[in-house]
Image (cartoon, helix red, strand yellow):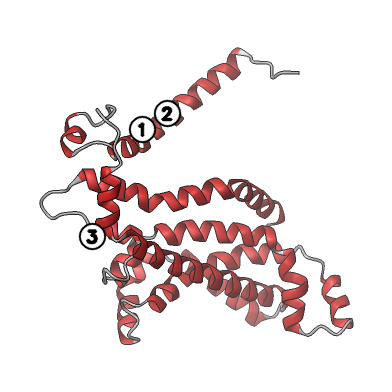
Amino acid sequence: MGKKYTKKTLLLETIMVAIASVFMIPMYYLVVSTFKNQQEIMEHPLGLPKAFSLANYERALSTMDYWRNFGNSLLITSVSVILVIILGSMAAYSISRHRSKLSKFIGALFLIGFMVPAQTTMLPLFTVMKKLHLINTYKGMILLHCNQCVFAFMLYKGFIQTIPQELEEAAKIDGCNMWQLFWKIVFPLLKPVTITVAIFNVMWIWNDFMLTYLFLNSSKKATLIMQVFNGMGTFSNDWSMMMPALVLALLPMVIFYLIMQKQIVEGVVSGAVKG
């Protein structure tokens, strides 16, 4: 049977479509502007271009050194996410299974650290990074983005506490050591929350601007988001090039989201139920 529409349902859906349309205006403006010249963008911001051309994209690709910046973003994001998953899951397992005063204290310390706004720690963090010679390096950026381990720890901890310890006890009887117990028995059961952690961290690290702006100032090591910022002029901007540069920087994450949207929903729902 088809869905029965009432006046209330129709009204609510109309309102939702209207609200969604309003939020889509900036995206429409961004995409349409990539096919216009500078004059058209200024005179007719929401109008369609007189002629569709990929010339702006070609100019943006050659100017921003897209593939080098794409490789930088991919390297920093992928290594950071892998470390966040490994360190976050291992820390959560250790704290969850060792219920001592020390483990409770460490868990509370992680929680307090998660509550502190990152902006308040930028000055001392910059000083520490400078003394360690990690400014303007890949490993420095990866280390900074590993602060998301605390977020991963919180998600993993709630999930691990729902796993029956009888499984681990049976594995110990079969001769598994602690390392084998975690990676062969426990970690495969963490797949739903691992997908959630991976997806949210990929999108956050890829689109991060603040840490990249403060700690990575080399054009050769710049990420896509940073390179878009570097292309902005002091007194004037070439929007006909900036718009396609923005689209090219965001396009990998749009594709990633479209591919992973089913896993995003499943991971969030599963994490909510387990947590």
Amino acid type, callout 1: Ile
Q: Is residue 119 visible?
A: no
Foreground: disc 3 or disc 1:
3
Q: Closer to the N terminus: mark 3 or mark 1?
A: 1
- Residue at (64% x, 79% y) in the render: 103
Which quadrant: the C terminus? bottom right
The residue that disc 1 covers is 25
Q: Nearer the viewer, mark 2 or mark 3?
A: 3
- Badge 1 marks a residue whose secondary structure is helix
x, y percent for residue 198: 57, 61
Q: CA distance from mark 3 to mark 1?
A: 26 Å
Gap between marks 2 and 1 measured at Cα? 7 Å
Q: Are marks 2 and 3 in contact (CB under 8 Å)?
A: no
Left-right relation of 166 to 42: right
Q: Where does the image place residue 227, in percent across and percent down from the top left?
A: 28, 60
Bin the neighbour count of mark 3 within 10 Å (Cα to Cα): few under 14, some 14-19, many 20 and up. Answer: some
Instruction: Tell me if 225 is positioned left or right of 152 in this view.
Output: left
Q: Which residue is mark 2?
A: 21
Residue drawn at x 85%, y 77% is 171
Residue under numbered circle 3 = 230
Q: 267 above or below 89?
A: above
Which circle marks residue 178 in the picture?
none
